[in-house]
Image (tube, helix red, strand yellow):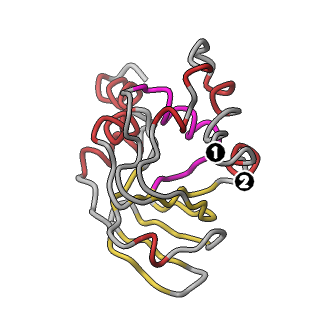
Amino acid sequence: MIVKGEAVIFGDDVNTDVIIPGRYLTTLDPEELARHAMEGLDPEFPSKARRGVIIVAGKNFGCGSSREQAPIALKYAGVRCVLAESFARIFYRNAINIGLPVLECPGILREVSPGDNLTVNLAEGKVRNDTKGITLEALKLPDFLLSIIRDGGLIEHLKRRLGTA
């Protein structure tokens, strides 16, 4: 499974309250959530994300509350993948559950600049910075998590396995 996109950079400790501010949690509409994704850090993020971006971040991405709306907002905004030095565990699992690819990639912030074109091979755990001509090693996702992402999230994956999709 290959994912391509332009890098949008964020630092360490990006919490779920910044990914989708609490005042927008009155809606369950993923498109509405997407319109407010990351607005506290970058008000232009939703328009950038519509082009299909890859978020590159530092340590502890998705820390804070366990709100499932955070990865939903990113996915529906147009984020194709999140690459980070490390993730808060609940965000990581919520992202997989809704079919948003996430990979831990040590050293990623040192090797990627805003706007770099990236190619991510999820199955191999390889991140290619096409702009700089370098390849980075990410922590490879196990096959069972790849199959959940490939199916579009946990619910769709279970429907497929049960033959109800």
| Magenta highlight range | 67-82
Q: Quadrant of the N terminus?
A: bottom left
Q: Residues within 10 Å of mark 2 (few under 14, many from 20)?
A: few
Q: Which residue is mark 2?
A: 51
State the residue in front, 37 or 30: 37
Query: What percent of the width, then of the height, locates residue 91?
Result: 36, 38
**Please, is residue 88 above or below residue 111 in the view?**
above
Q: Secondary structure at mark 2?
A: loop
Q: Is residue 76 magenta?
A: yes
Q: Is residue 71 left or right of residue 157?
A: right
Q: What amino acid type is highlighted by mark number 2?
A: Arg
Residue 92 numbered mark, or none = none
Which residue is drawn at the image coordinates 72% and 47% (left, top)? 50
Q: Is residue 109 magenta?
A: no
Q: Is residue 62 left or right of residue 7?
A: left
Q: Residues within 10 Å of mark 1 (few under 14, many from 20)?
A: many
Q: What amino acid type is highlighted by mark number 1?
A: Gly
For the view shown, which residue lies furthest in the bottom direction? 133
Q: Which residue is mark 1?
A: 78
State the residue in front, 19 or 143: 19
Query: What percent of the width, then of the height, locates residue 46?
Result: 71, 43
Q: Quadrant of the C terminus?
A: top left
Q: Are marks 1 and 2 in contact (CB under 8 Å)?
A: yes
